[in-house]
Amino acid sequence: MLETLTDRFRSVLPSDLGAGGYASIRYVQSRSEGLSVRQGVVQPVRNSEEAGAMVTVWSGGGLGYAATSDLTPSGLATAVDRAREWAHITSGLGVLAEPPLAHTVGEYSSPVERPWSDTTLTERLDLLRRQDELLGVDERIVDWEAGLAHRVVDTMMVTNGGGMVTQHYESTFPSLRATANEGANTQTRTYGGHAFCGQGGVEVLDRHGFSDAAPRIAAQALELLSAPNCPTGVMDLVLAPDQMILQIHESIGHPLELDRILGDERNYAGTSFVTPDMFGSYRYGSDLLNVTFDPTVPGQMASYGFDDDGTPARREYLIEKGVLQRPMGGRISQARAGLRGVSNSRACSWNRPPMDRMANLNVEPGESSFEELISSVERGVYLETNNSWSIDDSRNKFQFGTEYGVMIENGELTHTVRNPGYRGISATFWRSLSGVGDHSTWKVMGTPNCGKGEPNQVIEVGHAAPVCRFSDVEVFGGEQ
């Protein structure tokens, strides 16, 4: 089918756009399956499939898009005409005279060790039934659920200059949740929130210990019922990787998206405290902070060979030894801002144009073991798994809550606390980074539902992080 579509795309792409003209057709086909068992009851199976194409035309300094699910020659020709019409309407109105895009040739495929198709639907549901039984082990657990989802996406981009990029993605998303109640106290414990996912097949479950997690999740939900409230005060904070991914996402990822820095998101999701003049000199964090944009990590949630403008994927430092180096901006935003960026122009589907998005955004591991990070804390708290977040429009002041905390006293983990949270200011917080875990603490994770843009685009994002320690952070409990 792809061969047929390739010929069809090339036959309708315009060849008369003149100097600086550019046109592409990006085809996306996605298929997904969602399964869950809640309180012993198999929920309706959720299957979806969609396909379509986005036409992009640059001509005379104008830019036009048109999307269609009609992939017949006439349907594609109509979409090309509509994109050309919009390019004509916007001619001379854009900030770029010519498109900074290339006619790339290449391919990518997610690494898959155990294909989803090697298991039957019955086997997948039996796995979820077993996990569901392990969650609902106590009458105080009033709600519980085990879930699995799998998504396959095939893309192909053909350009009028001979470009041809094909990419194949497979991703797996396991989930577990147990909610316990006693009187007025309700506590929920999950399997990493939405963090334990990645590209690949059934092996993703083993990668994140899915089959062993349910007893721990249930036990910790019950444990939280009798735990004291987290104390309030300024203290050291040690964050597990599944909380670090939220911290990275909100207070590094979104502030460094170049289109947001340029003002594109101000009427929807806000702006950024970062300004273009900061790159190359701004002290974003302590010397221990090293952050990479790396869509080449095998099996991470947002790995790819090329972004959706055809730019080859490369690993780049965004922050090195605490100093801000470059933003997350694709070729178009780079040309607008005159700044070096990365290959992060991405779209969530066939009916959305690409824009600057996070992909794999990772805090690099340091040199401290988990024991060393804990042993140096006189008084502090260790936190796992985000359950609430709030951050201002410029991605600066934040307040985050987590599911599970353990107090640290005189260098030792002591007792569990419930309803832990913390707050801070992005740059001040990262400058307080005082310890970074080594590779043994580094976990490759992600999230399937980062939203941005108008119309909205929900996209998969990867984050990897070690355990990290921060000094003198404002910590609070749920009861004040």
Image (cartoon, helix red, strand yellow):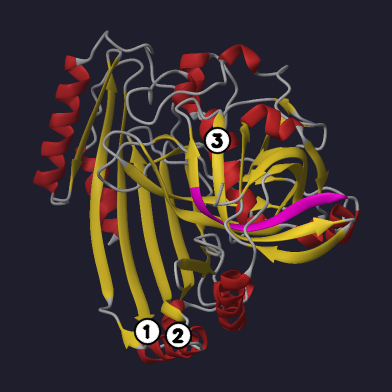
Instruction: Classify mark 1: residues with Cα within 10 Å, few (<14), some (14-19) or many (20+).
Output: some
Residue 398 numbered mark, or none: 3
Mark 1 — residue?
39
- Write down the region rendered in magenta: 377-388
Q: CA distance from mark 1 to mark 3?
A: 35 Å
Mark 2 — residue?
132
Are the residues flagged by discs 2 and 1 in contact, CB closer than 8 Å? yes
Nearest the viewer among 105 and 423 is 423
Q: CA distance from mark 2 to mark 1?
A: 7 Å
Residue type highlighted by circle 2: Asp
Residue type highlighted by circle 1: Gln
The mark closer to the camera, 2 or 3, is 3
Q: Is residue 248 above or below residue 260?
A: below
Relative image position of residue 459 (x, y in whole percent) = 40, 48
Magenta stretch: dominant secondary structure: strand
Instruction: Classify mark 2: residues with Cα within 10 Å, few (<14), some (14-19) or many (20+).
Output: many
